Amino acid sequence: MLLLLRLARKLIGWADFIAFTALLYLLAWLPWPGKRSSHPVARMFNAWCRAFVRALDVDLRLHQKNLRRLPERYILIANHPAAFEDIGIPALFDVVSLAKVQVKDWFLVGRISQAAGTLYVDRDSPESRHHAIDAMVEAVNGGQNIALYPEGGCKGRRLFHEFQSGAFDVSMRTGVPVLPVFLHYEAQDDFEWQPPYTLPQKIWHMATTVNNRANYYVYDPLEPKDYADKHAMKAAAYALYVRWNAQYLE
């Protein structure tokens, strides 16, 4: 009976998601003279991400480990073990994400992400990384919250050996705090995105996993005024993630 109920939930979820995706894809071609943040796709993008989560039937849980009330404006950072967080984070947080430039070419999703105001970076180009930081500063100063992954891409279920400085540079330049979120997928093999698997294969793995629980732990923000520079802030953030990695994954 439970299996039938889950199957019915999945079928309804996919029907809703496919219809929603078709609508957003059509709207993504709509000429829009105003700000990207006011584009219809941008206003509906978070709801679309939630529809995608429902279609995959992932049990996404937000754990509020923060002791203080979260700020209205923030730069969200997270570890990056899977592709799921590209929709999981904006499903829970009102953010504009930084993504690799290759996302622009993804079927359907690329066009929708562009209309939603996603920021892009070519990770192999120093010039592109520099322009991405300027774009993030502009977005934050314009009142938007942004999300990025300081590991610099999907590095697997365990924390990578270093963080990039971009998020902390933006925080120092804008005065907006960094909000750390730690991600833990209980069925790590099914969610972790590493070679040789392709993105469609990982979507299938996530949609068919026996354990569909995804835990997102949000902690107190890091204030830029508390650190000497971006390097000190990065080191403090990385130390926290090392501790959480040991707590949840080891």
Image: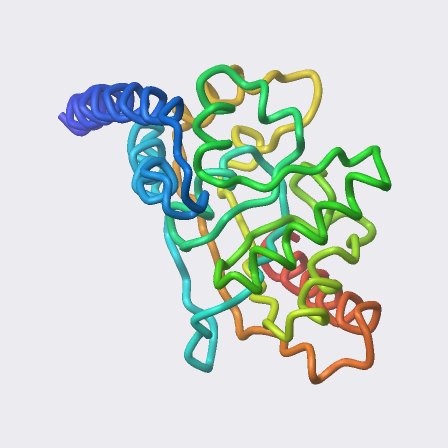
Q: In which quarter of the image is residue 81?
A: top right
Q: In this view, does 1 lie above or below 177?
A: above
Q: Is residue 44 above or below residue 181?
A: above
- As drawn, is 149 to the left or to the right of 228? left
Residue displayed at 69% across by 59% down: 167
Q: In which quarter of the image is residue 141?
A: bottom right
Q: Is residue 96 above or below residue 229?
A: above
Residue 2: x percent and y percent? 18, 29
Q: Is residue 127 above or below residue 3?
A: below
Residue displayed at 32% across by 26% down: 27
* Camera-nearest residue between 50 and 65: 50
Residue displayed at 78% across by 44% down: 129
Rendered-image quadrant of the N terminus: top left
- As drawn, is 110 to the left or to the right of 60? right
Residue 42: x percent and y percent? 38, 41
> Which residue in the rendered view is the most extreme toward the front?
33
Residue displayed at 37% across by 40% down: 39
Residue 169: x percent and y percent? 75, 63
Residue 78: x percent and y percent? 60, 53
The total of numbered circles placed on residues is 0
- As drawn, is 19 to the left or to the right of 212? left
- The colour mode here is rainbow
